[in-house]
Amino acid sequence: MAQNLIDALALGSLYALIALGVTLVYSVMDMMNFAHGEFIMLSAYALYVLAGLPFGIAVAGAVATGILVAVAAEWVAFRPVRNADLSAQLVTSLAVATILQNVVLATVKARPKSVATPTFVGESTQVAGLSVPNLEFLTLGLTAAVLVGLGWLLYRTRAGLAMRAAAENFEMARLLGVRADRVIALAFAISGALAAVVGVLLVMQTGQVSPTMGLTPVLVGFVAVVIGGFGRMFGAVLGGMLLGAASSLLGAYLPDSLVSFRDAIVFSLPVAILIFRPQGLLGGATGEARV
Amino acid sequence: MTGVRLRSRASLSVSLLAPLVLVALTALVGADGTPSLQGTVTTILCNLVIVLGLQVFIGNSGVYSFGQLGFAAAGAYLAALLTLPAAFTALQTPSLPDPIAGADLGPLPSTLIVVVACGALAAIVGLPLMRTSTLAIPISTFAFLIVVYNVLANWDAVTGGASGLVSIPRTTTIGSAACFAALASLVALAFKWSSSGYRLQATREDEVAARSLGTGVTRERLIAFTLSGALCGVGGALAVHQSGVLNPTTFYFAASVTTLTMLVVGGARSVFGAVVGTIAVSTVNELLRSLEGGASVFGVLTIGDTPGLAAIGVGLILLATMIAMPDGLTAGREAGELPWIRRLRAMRTPPVPAPAGAVGVERSHAPAVSQTLSAEGIAVSFGGLHVLRGVDLTLRRGEALGLIGPNGAGKTTLVNVLSGYLEPDAGSIALDGIDVSGRSPARLARMGLSRTFQAALPFRQLSGLESVAVGAMGVGVARRRAVEIAAEVLERLGMREQASLAAGSLTPAGQRLLGVARALATGPRYLLLDEPAAGLSEAEGDELVAILRAVLEDFRCGLLLIEHEMSVVMSLCPRVQVIDNGVTLRIGSPDEVQGDPAVVEAYLGSSYTVAIGA
């Protein structure tokens, strides 16, 4: 029981990290970024490419890759459609995701590659009679560090103030002298770094990389954001936690005949929530026109 | 009255025929080709049915769905299981229930079952999803796609699991695929030009304005989603009977991206665009795919084994389209609306003939029990800010009431409450004696209460005549009659010239007047106008006053006029209500109100009152 709760919390944390990366870009640019899954995938491939180097350096390379790819995608593809409507931006990000995924497919090929990770990641630690995988400690610790770090950045720095202002009212923030290009690039950079953290954790979990590994995470991030309410940082964390916990607990408690339908049940969850709360749990701005 | 049409006969015929001709040409290219070319052409035509399904929902609603391929998958599996010979079914899906396992139908009956089943599935799935927002729909439909995939890949006993189904009868020919594609394009056009299609397009152009004209956004989206699901199901059924094999990835993410690209490249708003885009993108896609296994291009460039090449191409085309040409190759126009075709045939939308009959708004003559719109004790606060603090308002049929007050007095908030856009914290609203508190804007419009907005909120892509006709369609008037009413209203407002122009191309004054025309076409018993003269020149303002005076006489509706331009209010409204700071300051004739020191003070401040010795 306690074991299952820790598993649920760990998966929830991972999902919350994904949702944070998605919502950060949404809050400054009103764009749901399909390519976030590919930022995760490319960071994971950086680990594969840098496999010979010490693991710490490889991780740094993965984070750098996530940031670089995110900022480059913003510069090349998303800046030209910044003023387009929500749907057009979403489709643009879908195009970017398709290109990135298939470039990897064409160059590294479809077959999953295995990546070696430090042995302690695969081991467990005994805590109060429970055997908790070290990876879960790492996930929880990283999530806590990211939340604290992001909180510090957003509420204690000038750049964070600019981002929060832009998230409230982008045009007004611009008129007051906030540099739009910088704020958006910064949001993408942080989002890319978060994607890299998720990519590294996923590699540690599964020990391999594949070109399609970004698809499920990006859906997780999207659904978490919908559940939590668009553009709310706390909503994204809450949505991610709920989704991860639900997924983990269903995996533990569903009868054997139904376990393989876990994803179907988990992703039907938002529909159930949206029936009762069409605006999401925290009811943020949803792109609805105002009178 | 007859003869009012939304488009000329020539334009209509070209728009209807162009997709059919393209389908026929595509089929002819493949008909005499190698078996491989025939297969490719048949696949393109099957894809076209799916893309037309996407067009019905995405094109008309402007909302993206990534889940329509889920309906194609459902249709494909159902069609496969219905047509697989019983012996094969028993081998591949041992525990399939008997009626389906035993079924050994031909392609046509199975396709008919698929239409009904996929339509029903889309209606059930859409019921909760369409209630959410424009941005939540793409994501929740994406989730639906993954749910379908997960079920298909794991329900081994029924779907054959991840390995899928084989030996499905290959009954789809170029001819049958072409027939279905032609039929689907006619269905898509018929829907686009139906009342429901127009109402949905109005929500795409401006959701807020469409609701004020009686259009229920959720309902119209659900209708299109259902039709789209049925069409996608047919496309899936056709495709599976072409390839003979099926697995859960056949209609999954990659196929979603490819079909969406086809739609967007051609121009999502247009059925013709869906056809053009499908043919164009399919051609590029097939060329690239033939290079994936490794090839040499003109002996110069040698390409090694590169899986994903076609998908990269599709992604680049989609990206380039979104950046450089978001309206697609056809700019969202049907064939008969393309500029060069119009020039070629000198075709124009026919001028609106002068109306011959009586005012087209029958409801105006219906007797009502108590002919007033009345609000009592309306209170609204945003956070700690009390915008309205117990305001009463009574508007009688046939009268013009001016609502004035300084900026921030709460005038627009009051109109938003009356028209159902804002729920008050306290107070009640009665329309002809019926309590209508809490009803939606669309429902109120259907009960005879319409409004305009401070911004013109035009339906940019619709013509003037279409924009106004949507008003009548929104309250349930049949399409043909709605067009006649629209023509009459435009004539009354002196807007015949603007009938055939796109609403987005009109002058600001024209767009504003068109907003009034739209609202009038709903046959309102009460019409709320929020600053109709804002931004108009003095001459345009005078013209507006004349038109509103005529409206009051012709349409016999109660008119509530919010206006800053005092001359407009004073010349039109025998009764004026002044509100300030969320309460009613004074109700009276224009002269009484202007002479009231409290009103003067509210507008100009107390120091001014003292200075002039009032």
Image (spheres, coloured by chain):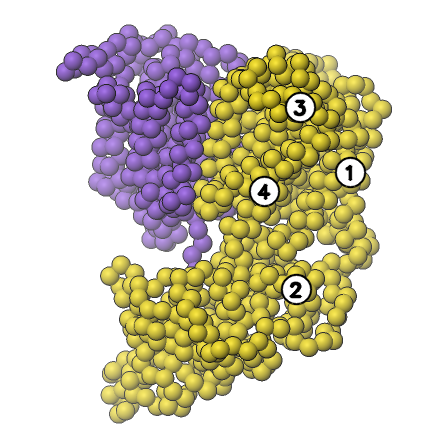
Chain colours: A purple, B yellow
Tag nearer the camera, 3 or 4: 3
Tag nearer the camera, 4 or 1: 4
**In the depicted view, which residue is nearer to us: A74 or A2?**
A2
Which residue appears farthest toward the right when viewing the image?
B32
Left/right of residue B477 with respect to residue B432 in the rendered view: right
User: Crowding near pointer 4: few (<14 within 10 Å), some, many (20+)?
Assistant: many
**Residue shown at 71% from the left, 31% from the top:** B109
Task: Check disc 2 and report the residue beneath it.
Answer: B482
Task: Check disc 1 and report the residue beneath it.
Answer: B22
User: Crowding near pointer 1: few (<14 within 10 Å), some, many (20+)?
Assistant: some
Tag nearer the camera, 3 or 2: 3
- Quadrant in which the C terminus of chain A is drawn: bottom left
Task: Check disc 3 and report the residue beneath it.
Answer: B103
- Marks 1 and 2, Cα distance to the nearest angstrom? 32 Å
Q: x, y percentage for residue B516? A: 56, 70
Which residue appears farthest toward the left when viewing the image?
A128
Chain letter of disc 2 in the image: B
- Marks 4 and 1, Cα distance to the nearest angstrom? 26 Å
**Residue shown at 62% from the left, 30% from the top:** B75
Q: Are marks 3 and 2 in contact (CB under 8 Å)?
A: no
Tell me the kind of residue under disc 1: Leu
- Marks 3 and 4, Cα distance to the nearest angstrom? 26 Å
Chain letter of disc 1 in the image: B
